[in-house]
Image: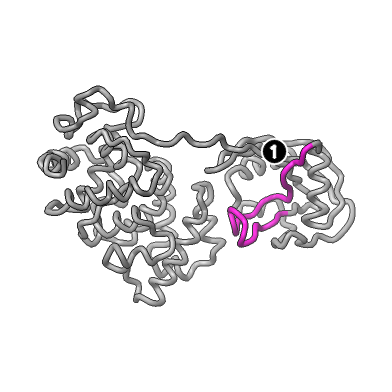
Amino acid sequence: MTELIRTAIPGLLAWYRVNKREMPWRDTPDFWKVWVSEIMLQQTQVETVRPYFTEFISKFPDVHSLARAEEQEVLKAWEGLGYYTRARNLQKAARKVSAEMNGQLPKSFSRLLDLPGLGPYSAAAIASIVFKEPVPAVDGNVLRVFTRLTELGDDISRPQTRTLVFGILSDVISGFPPGDFNQAMMELGAIVCKPRQPDCPVCPLNRICASHKNGTQLRFPVKKKAAVKPHHLIGVGICMREGKVLIAKRHEKQMLAGLWEFPGGKIENGETEEECILREMREETGLTVELVRKIAKTDHAFTHFSITLNAWLCNWVSGEAQPLSGSEIRWILPEELDDYPFPKANKVIIKEFRSAVK
């Protein structure tokens, strides 16, 4: 199978040169642009990344500028892109590269793996595209192409399957431009070998593809059915006092660490939204508040769970705000909300809040 795949690679590379999409980080030896793009592209589609990438590179044009930046500035630039641990790890790695490596990335796959935020896929992509190391980058697109090509029935969610594919492609990639090979495989999965509607007639690998021959494309890849995500109901209070609104910063051990939010939490069994918010305000800030009215309801999905966020406008009654949950809290003017990085779901609430207090 390895030799059969190798015979089709020249055609794949020729297809890639003609059909590859224009991207602001592509066709450049600039390791910084490639690095930033690969981190942003983790679990995020190209079209979503494009505007964020352009703005991020404008703010942080090199590794040293990101290393010097305040974390809040970095999170604000990442706001809305999600998976904020990526931004925090990118800055940690940038600080390490800036301070300890004279601003230069390690030039090997194995050493790249030592940097925060770089796993096997990202390290391989950078090593192959920037440093021409013949190491395959195995992401979801590549796994889909490979399993259809070979009718491999192993569960792609298992690490052993990725290791198997990595090993086979390590033999295949030798002798070809590694950066082009990896990008061609990923591009093929993104625009031709799509999950539900593969465009097999235009695929440069169709003559050797086992699933195309047997009409089994939609059976691959094989992946264990995901468990049903838990769903949580959340109540939050937008508390006003003398024209200012209270916000809280999520602490280091929480998901979305470093971002800001309105105080609140999960609605317990048998508890109403109103009861939840009154309780959470006491427990998180020590404040007694009165509820005015509900101003927003929004749904949001995370990787392992989903939420319905219910937001109520409320007024301060008594007490001095204290960060009882361990997070930082601040009273700020409503117009200052744009200066702070918030999770995506909170942006919906901010919009409704502004309409409610006009």
Q: Position of residue 309 (x, y in %)?
A: 68, 39
- The type of colouring in the image is one colour
What residue is shown at x 75% (from left), y 41% (from top)? Answer: 267
Q: Is residue 343 magenta?
A: no
Q: How many numbered badges does the structure rendering display?
A: 1
Q: Secondary structure at mark 1?
A: strand
User: In which quadrant of the rendered view does residue 257 lie?
Assistant: bottom right
What residue is shown at x 85% (from left), y 51% (from top)? Answer: 316
Q: Residues within 10 Å of mark 1 (few under 14, many from 20)?
A: some
Q: Is residue 307 left or right of residue 128?
A: right
Q: Quadrant of the C terminus?
A: top right
Q: Position of residue 238 (x, y in %)?
A: 75, 46
Q: Is residue 265 magenta?
A: yes
What residue is shown at x 67% (from left), y 39% (from top)? Answer: 232
Residue farthest along the top direction in this orientation: 215
In the image, the segment drawn in magenta is 247-269
Residue farthest along the right direction in this orientation: 318
Q: Position of residue 11 (x, y in %)?
A: 12, 38
Q: Is residue 326 left or right of residue 23?
A: right
**Residue nearer the viewer, 172 or 333:** 172
**Residue nearer the viewer, 36 or 112:** 112
Q: Quadrant of the N terminus?
A: top left
Q: Position of residue 174 (x, y in %)?
A: 15, 54
The overriding secondary structure of the stretch rendered in magenta is loop
Q: Which residue is mark 1?
A: 233
User: In which quadrant of the rendered view does residue 189 lie?
Assistant: top left
User: In which quadrant of the rendered view does residue 10 lie?
Assistant: top left
Q: Is residue 250 above or below residue 270?
A: below
**Amino acid under label 1?**
Leu
What residue is shown at x 77% (from left), y 61% (from top)? Answer: 324
